[in-house]
Image (cartoon, grey):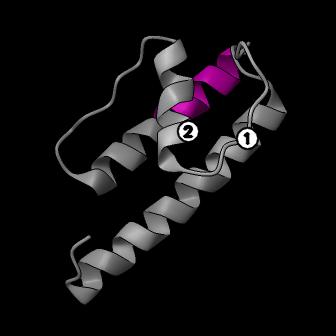
Amino acid sequence: MASLPREYRTLYDVQQLLKEFSVFVYVGKRLYDIELMAIELDNFYQSGVIDRQVYMKAKIVLRKEHREEQFREKSGRLY
């Protein structure tokens, strides 16, 4: 299980969760990074490594970030 209960509000928070399990995601495109993080998170939950509460909080963050990144790409905006 994840070592300390914490809030998951940003993509960085989810990256730190994955880092606890020695998972570092960098594909080169932010949208793809978010998608791969979601897959890793799904695998952790299905394997029983993280509990439902941690999974749901992190998943919500990833969905939000994914939606925002898609909007940024469609509108042609940079950070």
Q: Which residue is drawn at 73% across and 45% down?
A: 57
What is the quadrant of residue 44 in the picture? top right
Residue 61 image point, x, y percent? 60, 53
Q: Which residue lies furthest to the bottom in this view?
A: 75
Q: Main secondary structure of the magenta part?
A: helix
Question: In the shown orientation, is residue 11 left or right of residue 2?
Answer: left
Disc 2 to disc 1: CB gap under 8 Å: yes
* The C terminus lies in quadrant: bottom left
Picture layout, residue 28 above or below residue 16: below
Q: In this view, does 59 lie to the left or right of 54?
A: left
Total numbered labels placed on residues in the image: 2
Q: Quadrant of the N terminus?
A: top right
Is 43 included in the stretch rendered in magenta? yes
Q: Is mark 1 on a helix, strand or loop?
A: loop
Q: Give the range drawn in magenta.
A: 38-47
Three-letter residue code for mark 2: Asp
The circle on residue 13 is 2
Residue type, label 1: Glu
Expressed as whole percent of the image width and height from the top left, the position of residue 32 reads: 29, 49
Whether residue 75 is in magenta: the answer is: no
**Labelled disc at residue 7:** 1
Q: Can residue 62 be seen in this view?
A: yes
Q: Residue at image x 45%, y 62%?
A: 66
Residue 38 visible? The answer is no
Picture residue at 75% right of the left edge, 18% below the top:
4
x and y percentages locating residue 56 in the rendered image = 74, 44
Q: Please state the horizontal and vertical placement of residue 11, each as a whole percent of the image.
A: 49, 47
Residue 33, compared with residue 18, is above or below; it is: below
Q: Is mark 2 on a helix, strand or loop?
A: helix
Q: Distance between the residues labelled 2 and 1?
A: 8 Å
Q: Residues within 10 Å of mark 2 (few under 14, many from 20)?
A: some
What's the residue at 81%, 32% (across, down)? Answer: 52
